[in-house]
Amino acid sequence: MDAAKREKATYSLAGNMFKRGITVGLPIMLGYLPIAITYGVLAKQSGMSLLELTSMSVLVFAGASQFMGAGMIAVGASAAEIIIATFVLNFRHFVMSLSFMNRLRSMDLKWKLPLSLGLTDETFAVSALHTTEAKEEKGAFFYAGLFLTAYVAWVGGSFLGGVLGEIIPEKLSQSMGVALYAMFIGLLVPSVKKEKRVGLIALQAMVINVFCLYVLQMSTGWSIVCGTVIAGGSGIFLLKEEQA
Amino acid sequence: MIFLIIIGMSLVTMIPRMVPAFIVDRLQFRDWINRWLAAIPFAALGALIFPGIMAVKPNEPHIGLLGGLVAVGLSLLGLNIIFVVLGAIAAVFFLSI
């Protein structure tokens, strides 16, 4: 094969991986749109301009903390308070990123770095269950397609919410709030079907999360961190070598 | 002022996401740490689903739970995740009419 042909073959392989990533990212898009629109509406009501609320989605790209940020701006909280609260809420991404990057070890930093910025609860959950692509050639394009689909949906949805906010009936947008949870369930159930121990890990995380929230009165962010890290620890004993 | 807040929020969100990209190259994890990290996604899913799902409709935790049960049922049937999501949305929509 001459150089030009080889280049073309690599090119289309990258394109294929990218497309596969987009396909796998579609459920996230479906889940993000209603939530992003709701965020846009709320942020607009809390006094942010269209430019500000869209920029927040572009630069922060973390749902829960943006809702919180908009809410705190509305009640006139200080910048320091909002930024510290965001850090606490989003620190869970550190744990997720560590788990994800450990999968991508073989990839160059020039890929790992931009991919790390695309990690959210949802993109992490979906990509963590598509681990084989990390070892395939041009696997980075798969994750790039997946993350960009989610990012476009999030930013586009926020903008849309800011523009046409009040038109969407509340009943519908509220019903769509279940979308992300349904996606998490749709990701978890097939893994549990394959390996019951996985369900045990998830169940422990739920119990620990509830305990941290209601008994220890911890914040949502730290409760999720504790639930994830402690229940993940049981994987040391529950998961076999080949799954790790 | 709001832009200052946005940039601050952006930095404290970006840094925890980026740091692992730099450090995994320098660290060689033992087996048990690899197993721990491999279990993180499943643990995270559990912690993200519950009790958050009960807040889908404020003050009516059963609505989110029933929507979740529909999602469990549909994914046990082996449906594509898109249909699991759409089914749960439909269930919550009809329950809250």
Image (cartoon, coloured by chain):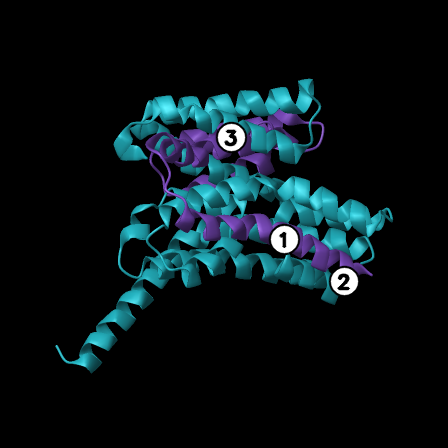
Q: Which chain is purple?
A: B
* Residue occupied by mark 3: A229
Mark yes or no: residue B56 visible. Answer: no
Q: Residue at x 79, y 48 (%)?
A: A80
Label 2 and label 1 in one chain: no
Residue A234 lies in what quarter of the image? Answer: top left
* Subunit under mark 1: A
* Residue occupied by mark 1: A36
Residue A44 lies in what quarter of the image? Answer: bottom right
Q: Residue at x 53, y 37 (%)?
A: A181
Q: Residue at x 48, y 60 (%)?
A: A114
* Subunit under mark 3: A
Q: Which mark is residue A223?
A: none
- In front here: A17 or A40? A17
Label 2 and label 3 in one chain: no
Q: Secondary structure at mark 3?
A: helix
* Residue occupied by mark 2: B3
Identify residue type, mark 3.
Val
Q: Secondary structure at mark 2?
A: helix
Are circles 3 and 1 on residues that touch, CB within 8 Å? no
* Subunit under mark 2: B
- In front here: A204 or A172? A204
